[in-house]
Image (spheres, grey):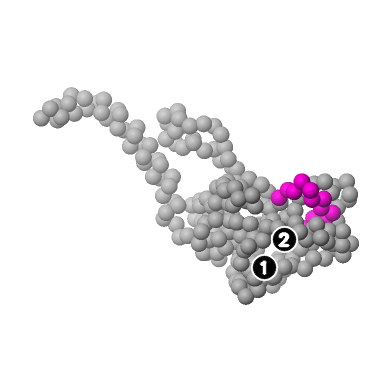
Amino acid sequence: MAFGKFVKDNLVLITGILLPVLIVIFFLAASMLPRFTGTPPQYDFLFVSEDYHNNLFAPVRFNFTTDENGRITAIVRGLPETHYGASQYPVFYRYYAAENTARPFHASYFRELIIRDGEKLKETKEVEMPDFLKSLRIDSSETAPDGYRLEFSHRSYNRSPASELFFMGSSRSRRGYRLVKDGNPLEFEVVTPGGHRAYYYSRNINFIGWITAEDTSSGGEAE
């Protein structure tokens, strides 16, 4: 049995080769396990971020919140002309739990509103919510009814315990948002208005809340 003799004669060498591989596999499996053992999210949610448009001179800014009935409202704040060049406009994003993906929700609406009625809004300080937002009922609690919450994460990557053990990986880090329940993190994909996809969306966001009810007859679905 040449193979058996080879193993016997080189047991220490074989063990030295296989043990690091097994340790790496163990740590990789341990890092992936929370994604598959937890109950998937059951609730969509909304957040607002800001996008930029070179030709947009916005005379107003919006601060979105919810009222006691779970309806989305906005406070309009006028800007001095010296700040018009900020070229920022709000974009709603909707996280779709069934897809584990967040996408722009009628991305162009508020940009077009600012272009059309910006100066008027600066005077009236009032804005009526569009049907696609009116149709939603929002729970603005930090934690969803199913136990998930949105949190900001700033952590290194390619620096797993296995990579530290064997001096592999880099010291780079990534920042963004993820869902967490019972200590188990769930990363989700974000599609930007430009169609770019990323698992870590690092821009500042305004979390609006969890969608608990929706009237789909009011045009609530995304564009």
Is residue 141 visible in the rendered image? The answer is no
- Residue 59 in the magenta stretch? The answer is yes
Instruction: Look at mark 1 in the image and give the residue it sits on.
Output: 132
Task: Give the number of the mark in front: 1 or 2.
Answer: 2
**Label 1: few (<14), some (14–19) or many (≥20) C-alpha neighbours in 10 Å:** some
Quarter in which the N terminus is drawn: top left
Give the residues drawn in magenta, as a range. 51-62
Query: What whole-number distance in Å separates the C-alpha atoms at marks 1 and 2?
Result: 10 Å
**In the picture provided, is 159 more to the left or to the right than 210?**
left
- Residue 41 in the magenta stretch? The answer is no
Q: Residue at x 45, y 52 (%)?
A: 35
- Which is more N-terminal, label 2 or label 1? 2
Q: Nearer the viewer, residue 180 or 104?
A: 104
Instruction: Look at mark 2 in the image and give the residue it sits on.
Output: 109
**Label 2: few (<14), some (14–19) or many (≥20) C-alpha neighbours in 10 Å:** some
At label 2, the amino acid type is Tyr
**In the picture provided, is 13 more to the left or to the right than 27?**
left
